Image (spheres, rainbow, N blue to C red):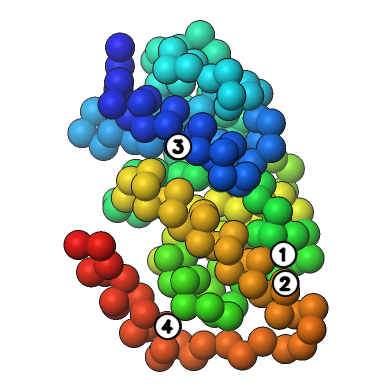
């Protein structure tokens, strides 16, 4: 079996996407690459996470050609490949339709530093312009906005997070959903206080040593 370790990680975090409430049904998708082998393990298209097994995880090369697996890779494969080619440290991509982050995306609101935990994604989370799912245009829009951050809101669609591994990308997705919830709560009763760039620089520096 090609990329057995990567497939196991994709399956594990796919199940966790569902149990954490970050997706519904078969929404969202996950990928993890092996840069030494220039291959990637990705979730299949349209299969519910609760019935997904290891053989269902698809292996592709970094040009998107299927190498192993009976099912089609996720329809969003273009931005998974593009993001992992964009920056050398990106090996994992997690895309969710989580409620609060998606609500912000539907409003067209970027997420500011209303809470320091946004630092998992960056100083803020910007919004990529809308494009139809699965298109090259959507991939281009995401890549044009992400910069050096680890999270992007996709207008009228959802959230995409990146990391050196799936644990980092998944944790970022959880934290951005939490901060999105806080932002919408505070906006419902007033104007929240936003942390400065300097304050966020200090947080992001501390995060480099968090849990190590």
Measured from the top left, where is residue 105 in percent x and y? 71, 60
Q: Which of 87 and 114 is in front in this view?
A: 114
Q: Cα distance, mark 4 to mark 1? A: 21 Å
Measured from the top left, where is residue 135 in percent x and y? 65, 39
Q: Would you say residue 149 is visible in this rendering?
A: no
Q: Tags 2 and 3 in contact by the CB under 8 Å rule?
A: no
With 137 as the anchor, is 108 left or right in this view? right
- Per the rendering, the mark at residue 88 is none
Q: Quadrant of the C terminus?
A: bottom left
- Per the rendering, the mark at residue 104 is 1
Where residue 19 sits, quadrant-wise, is top right
Q: Cα distance, mark 3 to mark 1? A: 24 Å
N-terminal-most mark, 1 or 2? 1
Measured from the top left, where is residue 196 in percent x and y? 49, 90
Q: Quadrant of the N terminus?
A: top left
N-terminal-most mark, 4 or 1? 1
Q: Would you say residue 186 is visible in this rendering?
A: yes
- Per the rendering, the mark at residue 184 is 2
Number of numbered discs overlaid on the protein picture: 4
Per the image, the residue denoted by label 3 is 13
The residue carrying pointer 4 sits among few (fewer than 14), some (14 to 19) or many (20 or more) residues within 10 Å by Cα, namely many
Label 1 SS: helix
With 51 as the anchor, is 149 left or right in this view? left
**Mark 4 or mark 3, whichever is nearer to me:** 3
N-terminal-most mark, 4 or 3? 3
**Mark 3 or mark 1, whichever is nearer to me:** 3
Residue ID at (44%, 28%): 11
Q: Cα distance, mark 1 to mark 2? A: 8 Å
């Amino acid at each position: 079996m090609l990329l057995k370790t990567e497939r196991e990680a994709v399956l594990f975090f796919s199940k966790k996407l569902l149990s954490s409430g970050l997706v519904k049904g078969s929404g969202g998708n996950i990928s993890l690459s092996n840069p030494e082998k220039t291959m990637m393990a990705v979730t299949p298209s349209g299969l519910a996470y609760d019935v997904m097994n290891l053989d269902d995880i698809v292996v592709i090369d970094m040009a998107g050609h299927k190498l192993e697996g009976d099912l089609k890779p996720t329809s969003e494969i273009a931005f998974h490949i593009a993001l992992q080619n964009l920056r050398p440290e990106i090996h994992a991509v997690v895309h969710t339709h989580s409620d609060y982050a998606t609500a912000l995306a539907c409003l067209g609101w970027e997420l500011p530093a209303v809470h320091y935990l946004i630092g998992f994604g960056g100083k803020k989370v910007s919004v990529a312009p809308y494009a139809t799912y699965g298109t090259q245009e959507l991939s281009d829009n995401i890549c044009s906005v992400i910069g050096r951050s680890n999270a992007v809101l996709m207008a009228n669609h959802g959230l995409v997070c990146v990391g050196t591994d799936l644990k980092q990308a998944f944790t970022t997705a959880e934290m951005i959903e939490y901060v999105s919830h806080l932002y919408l709560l505070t906006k419902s009763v007033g104007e929240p206080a936003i942390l400065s760039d300097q304050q966020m620089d200090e947080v992001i520096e501390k995060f480099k040593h968090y849990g190590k």
